[in-house]
Image (cartoon, rainbow, N blue to C red):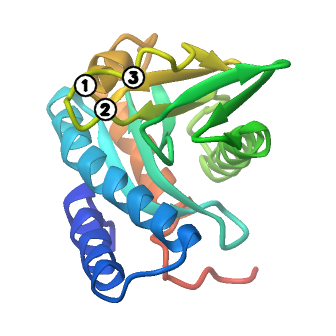
Amino acid sequence: MVWGAGAAAAASAAVLLLMRRYGGTPAEEFLDRTIHHETRLATQLEQLTAYGWTVLADRLVPGGEARVPFVLVGPAGVVIVTPAPAAGPWKTAHDEVFLEGRPLGTWVQTRWWEATTVNDAIGAAAQDMVFTGPTYPVIAVPSAQSGADIPSHPRLINAIPVIPYRHIIQGILDLPAPLPREAAANLAVVAGRVCVPAGVKQSQE
């Protein structure tokens, strides 16, 4: 079964309500905010379907249990969108980026590992469909409660675009788009087979 962004948003909202009911540690509260940001972003990304994109929400990286929030497949190829885990504040010091005081170096490197792993797996599974990538990682930045963009976030972190929520649709549409819609739809089928929904056990072949 292929889950859309709406189904993922509903599942995330259920977890969010349970966490708010019972409270939690600072780490759990951090996860609470992450789920909240993903739910908001899921609603926005649904707009991409009108432009020939498929939104695969709450997926597993092929070959393991690592989860990615959104795998987008469309005329530009494959884009993995991950919300920044908080709205801010951002700080750069000694070539390191910090978000709410947390260093993002390892977190950002994980985004590249996800993109590379997904890219290679889709390429191997595409068979007669030629797919050489690239698969783009993108970091989406939630807005502040006031609705204004956080001005302190960098435009790029380790060559990964950092895009505010309210610009994310245009940011995706601005990517080079060499694939016709039919080819993008076929690629989405392959991506959906390779990146299974989270919670679905992957076959060991």
Q: Give the crowd class for mark 2: few <14, some 14-19, many >=20 residues within 10 Å.
A: some
**Position of residue 163 in the picture relative to residue 60 (left or right):** left
Which mark identifies residue 143?
2
Q: Give the crowd class for mark 1: few <14, some 14-19, many >=20 residues within 10 Å.
A: some
Disc 3 + disc 1, Cβ < 8 Å: no
Residue at image mark 3: 150
Query: Circle 3 — which element?
Result: loop
Disc 2 + disc 1, Cβ < 8 Å: yes
Q: Relative to 161, is 29 above or below?
A: below
Of residues 38 and 133, which is closer to you in this image? Answer: 38
Name the N-terminal-most of marks 2 and 1.
2
- Residue at 36% x, 81% y is 19
- Residue at 50% x, 17% y is 152
- Quadrant in which the C terminus is drawn: bottom right
Which mark identifies residue 166?
1
**Residue type for callout 2:** Ser
Which of discs 3 and 1 lies nearer the camera? The answer is: 3
